[in-house]
Every structure is written in structure tokens, then in C-alpha cells.
Amino acid sequence: MPVLRTLVQRNPNPPYFLCNIYRLFNAQNTESYEPTATHYDNLINAAAGKGDFAAVGNLLNKRVRDGCFNTKRTFDFITNTDAGISVLDELSQTLAHLDHGFPRKSAYDSLIARLCKINREIADKSAIFCR
């Protein structure tokens, strides 16, 4: 048996080494970039900050198609911009034109959650002032 072991040559570059090199180069490929929910949240907040609600609607539809769900930060632009709650009319029109089903329901649920959080913050502030 020792004779057979000497006849078989070992590969100096094991296959796992080649696989790791392949993964390294593929990870740097920008074409395989998969957007995240945070990426979409940033895009939506930037578009809404500029008043481009058509882009907001497109991004809300696209994020669901890409497998990213709405988060608690999706509608941060309501409190983080000067327009504030005055954008609700345009936003409600935009949400009404979203794809039927999950994209629309998910967007409405996230918006309601955001508005409830704003209401709680206002209630907490008023409770502090009433003491």
C-alpha cells in the first residue's frame, strides 16, 4: 500500500482554495448586488424628500418584487422632512396606485405603524408638559 500512495500525486492547489478565490472575485462583482431593505428605505426617503412620489410608488413595488419588506424606517420622511404630515395626501394617492395585494397592504401597514408611533410620541410629550 505505501507504494500506491507514492504513485498518487497530490494537487498543490486543493479545490477548496480555488473555490474561495472564485467566491472572492464574484463577491466584488457589482452585477450580483442584491439590494436590502435598508437600501430601499434610503432611496424611498430620498425620493420623498424631493417630493417625487411617483418614484416612491415604483420603489415600494420594486422592493416587494426583490424580496425586501417594508420596515419601520420606510416612512421616516414623514417626520424627518420639513413637509411633515402635509405629505400624507400625496402619499395616500401614491399608495392607492401600488400593485394590488401584498405591496399595497404592506405599505399601508407600515404607514399606519409610523403614524401610530408619531401619535405616541406626541402623547408622551403632552403628558410630560401636563405634569
Image (cartoon, rainbow, N blue to C red):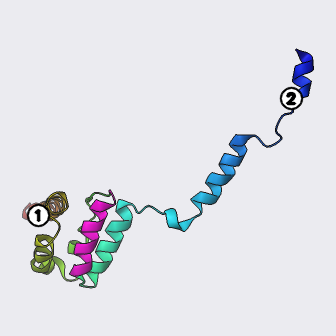
- The location of residue 49, given as percent across then percent down, is 27, 81
Q: How many marks?
A: 2
What residue do we see at 25% from left, 59% from top?
A: 72
Q: Is residue 82 left or right of residue 119?
A: right
User: What residue is shown with label 2?
Assistant: 8
Whether residue 8 is in magenta: the answer is no
User: What residue is shown with label 1?
Assistant: 119
Residue 120 falls in image quadrant: bottom left
What residue do we see at 17% from left, 66% from top?
A: 99
- The location of residue 125, given as percent across then percent down, is 14, 64
Residue 129 falls in image quadrant: bottom left
What secondary structure is marked by label 2? loop
**Up-down relation of residue 25 to residue 18 (above or below):** below
Q: Quadrant of the C terminus?
A: bottom left
Disc 1 or 2, which lies upstream in sequence? 2
Q: Amino acid at mark 1?
A: Asn
The stretch of residues the image draws in magenta is 53-67
- The location of residue 32, given as percent across then percent down, is 50, 62
Q: Amino acid at mark 2?
A: Val
